[in-house]
Amino acid sequence: MIHAANSSARSVGCSAWFPVAPPGSPSGPLRLYPSPQGTTNAPGTQTADANAPALAPEGKPFRVALLTAGPISDAGWNAGAYEGLQAIKKELGAEVSHQQTKSPAEFEAAFRDFAQQGYDVIFAHGNEYGDPALKIAKDYPNTTFVISAGGVEAPNVISIVYDLGQATYLMGEIGALMSKTGKLGAVGGVEIPSVKSTFISYEGGAKAAKPSTAVTTAYLGSWEDQNAAKQQTVALINAGHDILIHNADQAGLGVIQAVRENKEKGVFIFGTNKNQNDLAPEVMLASATIAYPEAFLNVAREVKNGKAKGRIEYLGLKEGVVGLEYNPALKPKIPDTVIQKVEQDKAAIIAGTLQVPRGKL
C-alpha cells in the first residue's frame, strides 16, 4: 500500500506489462506480458482514454483522473487503482486519465493541471498526496480530490482508508498456526505508516493465535527493487522464517519469486492489496484484497450526483471492501480448525467485538 512522500519515492518505468506465473513452470521466473490496455504513461505525462465519450449535449462529460506514484504493472496497489479508474469509465461513462507522479512538486502540478482542465474528480492513490491535495483543493472548489490511505479532509477533499490490517490480522493467525518453525517474516517496501500498520496487525493476529510466535519485519527502502526483495526474502528463509507476507508494490514480486524458488524448504507466502494467488499458486496461501472498483465507484457516483462531502472514510471487512481470499490450490493444506478460527474471528471483526491492533495511519 502507498505511501508517504520521502526520498524513497518511486521512479517508474513506462511500459504496461503485467506479471504472471508461466503455466507448467511453478519454479520459473515471473514473466511479463503486455497489458491489453496498451501502455501506461511515464512520470509527469498524461494519457487520456482514446475512446473517451464525446461532449454531452447538456454539458461537459464527467471527467475523472488518477494519480499514482508507481507503475500500474505492480499486480497490487497501483494496478488495483487503475482497475478502479476503468470501472468508473465503464459504469459511469466517464472520460478518464492516468498520470504517474513521483515527487511533491509533481503531485501539486498534476493536481493543478487536471483541476484547471475541469476534471470533476482526481483520485490520488497514496497518503503522500494528502498535504499537496489540501494546498491545491482550496483553489478549485468544483473539483473533488480523493486520497487513498489518506488522513486529511476538507470540503472537497475525501480520504479513503482501506483497513487492510483486518485481513492481515487473520493471515497472522493462519501463519502462526501453520508455521513449523514458529517464525514469520514480513517484507515491506518503504517504512511508512500504512505499511507498518498492516504488519502490526499481522503480528497481532499471529501472537493472538500463538503467543510464542516470532515475527521479523524488514524494509527495502524501495518500492521497485525486486532483486533487493529477493535477497532479503532469502535471508529470512535461511534464518528459519517459513511463512511470509509482503507489502512492497512492484518489489513484492521479488519476494514472491524468492519464496517460489525455495518452496522445497516448505515456505509459504501471503499476498496483499489484490488477489495475487495466481502469481504463485504453489506457495501463496491467501491474499488480503481491496475492492478498488467498488470504493472508487461509490465516491465517483457521489460526485456525479452532487452529493460528495469531505471526510475521512474507513472501509474494511464490514463494508465488503477489504477481504481475505484463500488460494483454492492450497486451501486444503490449511487445517479445518484453523479455517474455523479465522472465520469466527472474521465475524467478530465485522461485528465489532474484536478490535484489530494497528498503527497510526
Image: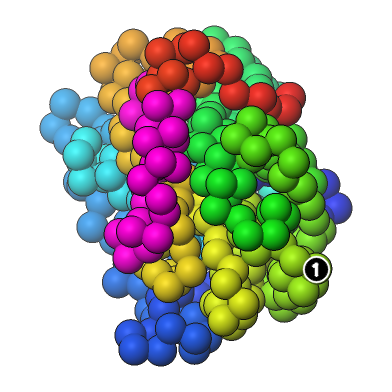
Query: At x 60% / y 13%, what residue is drawn?
Result: 154
| 117 with respect to 229 (left or right) | left
Q: Compared to 259, does 340 lie above or below?
A: above
* Image coords of residue 281 (percent x, y): 40, 70
Q: Is residue 344 magenta?
A: yes
- Return the residue nearer the eye: 83 or 306: 83
**Residue projecting furthest to the right:** 7
Q: Compared to 325, does 71 lie above or below?
A: below
Q: Is residue 204 magenta?
A: no
Q: Is residue 310 visible?
A: no
| 310 with respect to 211 (left or right) | left
Q: Quadrant of residue 280?
A: bottom left
Q: Secondary structure at mark 1?
A: loop
Query: At x 16% / y 26%, what residue is drawn?
Result: 58
Q: Which residues are magenta?
A: 317-346
Query: At x 22% / y 36%, what residue is drawn?
Result: 92
Where does the C terminus fall, quadrant-wise? top right
Hey, what amino acid is under mark 1?
A: Ala
Q: Residues within 10 Å of mark 1 (few under 14, many from 20)?
A: few
Q: Compared to 114, does 344 lie above or below?
A: above
Query: At x 65% / y 63%, what residue is drawn?
Result: 242
